[in-house]
Image (cartoon, helix red, strand yellow):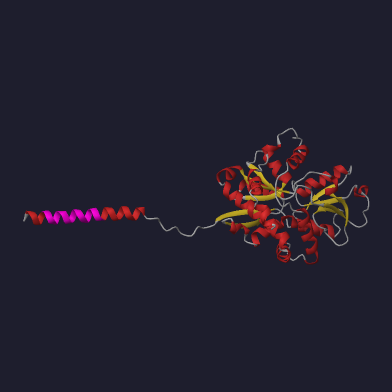
């Protein structure tokens, strides 16, 4: 009897030990990981203009997905409104007027510029055909999108250069399409625009000729997001510079993308494509001088420009040869 009880007891012990060992083995086995879900990011752009073609191409070619990101593009009319939405909302990255970004940081916004789409003013002052000299603008109205936008900043800058500051009225219209309508219908004398706003208008001043270091739009993120999610920021920047590269290397597809985002611009697609290729920077690096331009305008020229941007990520991308490989 005793030996039978001992045998039964040993059997139960063996079962318990077996279960323990099996549990240990199961815990030690590598767990099957589910397919990694792409991180969702919201990227805002601030105008219906070919200056944003790099962002559009990145979206349409799947460049964000290559970086493990699912990007939603958000159009918010005017750079100043885009920056406000960035500060108060759930945007992960904004491509908005440099003056709006720098001004918001001056007012305490927790933003930092991590890229620049171009480091010169890619706009011209277009006017009605009867205006042939700058002095003819005196007493007339020029259209802008909104106060605080790049069109507002550059219009003021041009008027100062022409000696017409406070001699021309500036009228906000709301968005780029509204500005174009105002020019075409003769409501205003002209506007600073990236592309010709009407078939009869003429270019009075080409802003790059003024020699102004100016970023049309800075790529900005929140500082805490930059600190906590550097790989995501890197992925978004890589997607953007790939979008610019694809614009240059796949012209036919680029035309389709431009037509989609410019709402079927038709005859102006050639102009839009040439404009984008001419002005969009391959490397998307922030030049300190473009920050200084805005600080000087704001009367804060003594502040250190490095407080407003950080090229660490984009410089690493360039150094690693990522950009160069896109053009081979």
Residue drawn at (88%, 61%) of the image:
200
Count of marks placed on residues: 0
Side (left or right) of 112 relative to 191:
left
Residue range of the region highlighted in magenta in the rendering: 6-18
Side (left or right) of 65 relative to 292:
left
x, y percentage for residue 211? 83, 44
Dominant secondary structure, magenta: helix
Which residue occupies the foreground of this view, 235 or 318? 318
What residue occupies the far left of the structure in this picture?
A: 1
Residue drawn at (62%, 61%) of the image:
62
x, y percentage for residue 273? 77, 61
x, y percentage for residue 76? 68, 54
Residue 85 higher or lower than 288, as above or below: below
Q: Quadrant of the C terminus?
A: bottom right
Occupied quadrant, residue 23: bottom left
Which residue occupies the foreground of this view, 27 or 167? 27
């Amino acid at each position: 009897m005793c030996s039978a009880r001992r045998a039964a007891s040993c059997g139960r012990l063996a079962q318990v030990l077996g279960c323990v060992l099996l549990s240990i083995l199961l815990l030690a086995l590598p767990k099957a990981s589910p397919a990694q879900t792409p991180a969702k990011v919201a990227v805002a752009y601030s105008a219906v203009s070919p200056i944003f073609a790099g962002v559009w191409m990145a979206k349409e070619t799947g460049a964000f997905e290559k970086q493990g990101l699912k990007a939603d593009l958000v159009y918010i009319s005017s750079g100043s409104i885009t920056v406000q939405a960035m500060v108060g909302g759930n945007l992960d990255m904004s491509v908005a007027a440099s003056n709006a970004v720098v001004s918001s940081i001056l007012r305490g916004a927790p933003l930092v510029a991590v890229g620049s789409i171009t480091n010169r003013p890619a706009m011209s002052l277009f006017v009605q055909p009867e205006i042939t000299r700058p002095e003819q603008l005196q007493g007339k109205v020029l259209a802008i999108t909104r106060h605080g936008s790049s069109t507002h900043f550059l219009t003021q800058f041009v008027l100062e250069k022409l000696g017409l500051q406070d001699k021309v009225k500036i009228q906000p219209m709301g968005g780029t399409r509204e500005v174009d309508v105002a020019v075409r219908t003769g409501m205003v004398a002209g506007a600073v625009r990236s592309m010709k706003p009407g078939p009869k208008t003429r270019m009075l001043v080409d802003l790059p000729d003024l020699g102004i270091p100016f970023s049309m739009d800075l790529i900005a993120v929140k500082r805490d997001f930059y600190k906590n999610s550097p790989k995501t920021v890197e992925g978004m920047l890589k997607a953007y510079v790939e979008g610019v590269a694809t614009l240059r290397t796949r012209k036919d597809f680029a035309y389709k993308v431009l037509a989609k985002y410019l709402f079927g611009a038709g005859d102006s697609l050639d102009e839009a494509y040439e404009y984008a290729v001419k002005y969009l920077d391959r490397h998307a690096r922030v030049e300190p001088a473009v920050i200084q331009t805005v600080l000087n305008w704001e009367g804060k020229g003594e502040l250190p420009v490095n407080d407003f941007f950080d090229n660490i990520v984009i410089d690493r991308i360039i150094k690693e040869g990522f950009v160069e490989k896109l053009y081979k």
